[in-house]
Image: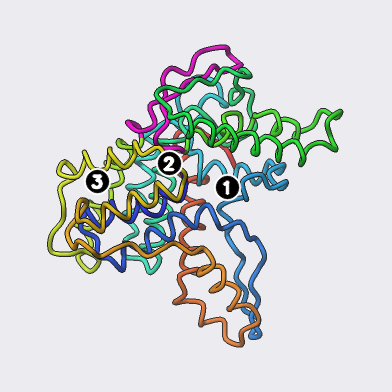
Amino acid sequence: MQLDMHYYGTYVMARAAGINAEAAQIIAYAAQFVDDNANKDSINFKDAGRIDAQATAHHALDIKNISKADQRQIWVPFHFLPGNEGNSFTERLICRKNSTISQEMYEHNLSLSDKEYALELLGITAHVYADTFAHYGFSGISSRKNKIINNSIEFQDLKPEIKKYITKKEKEFRKKYKSETGFLTNIKSFLIEIASGALGHGAVATYPDRPYLVWNFKYEKPKRNSGTRNNPATFLEGCEALYKMFRKFAENNSKYAESSYTQFSSIKSEVEKILFTQANKKGRIKAWQNAVKNGKLYQNAGEGIFKYDEKILHNQRNSLDKKKNSRIALNKNVYRFYQAASVHRNFVLRTLLPRHGLVVA
């Protein structure tokens, strides 16, 4: 999923579920920051304190994706949570929408709602959970099971101008892959596995993350048809699942909740309408904003949604470096995000996946 869903859609689902505006914004910022937090540099203080940053992403085509360790530490726990279906280890690592593992993940993270980093953790949880509804069928490690047959992608009911737009984006995507891997074209290497579409959903570019697409393709190994991937329907399932998770959180944490909430059934058709919006990212964001402004998604019509700015947390992080007293970090959102990311990663990799017989990292 992209910014329109991870920030704006997440904010709306949290507000509709009865979480107050201030808490919902922290949750939504954390949900989107999972995709923007690629910095691994430590933060050092003059009193000898230090924060070891917890990266939760790589920039889309960052050359650092060649690291097998990073795939297991970042891609698996934050973007391609294993679904644990199938026989082989690599099959079981494939992400499945709304899997049992994903449900256990969010139940555990909700149980930590008394922690100072609870809202940031809920945002990270929302990101990981939502991604199961977009990234299903692919895994976060380099695997031949992620490859597809060239030119097998087909779209349904797509406006000509949107098809032109997304195919142009795909060409840019593949061109950048090629430019970053060209110096190793004659060498069998892990990097070539990435360039060939063996990592994540790189083989189908950003199509799984576009909410309006109805499409299909053919996997290479084993050769099979993906079946129709109805992104609007699946994303709608994801929105309802997020809503239910946020509703559970609001019911058990009155300090973050408002006195009333909106039933998902009453906004389902409006959410579906937004998801079907065939537009670029800016246009899709506008659809969420307009629906909120017009009071179609929850009470407090005209409230609006603050524009997401990833620089806020990056600047907050940068402002801490070389400061005299390390204790000033404790109440910063970016530090609480690092705390939450560490807790989530450790639970998924060291407890949750091993509980299901998956030893990933």
Quarter of the figure with residue 264:
top left
Give the answer, above or below, for where 17 lies relative to 166. Answer: below
Q: Residue at x 76, y 41 (%)?
A: 180
Mark 2 or mark 1, whichever is nearer to me: 2
At label 1, the amino acid type is: Ile
Q: Residue at x 51, y 46 (%)?
A: 350
The span shown in magenta is 210-234
At label 3, the amino acid type is: Lys
Q: Which circle marks residue 74 in the picture?
A: 1
Residue 5 in view in this figure: no
Q: Earlier in the sequence, mark 1 or mark 3?
A: 1
Q: Which residue is mark 2?
A: 279
Q: Residue at x 64, y 81 (%)?
A: 45
Q: Of residues 139 and 7, which is closer to you in this image? A: 7
Q: How many marks?
A: 3
Q: Which residue is mark 3?
A: 244
Q: Is residue 321 left or right of residue 193?
A: left
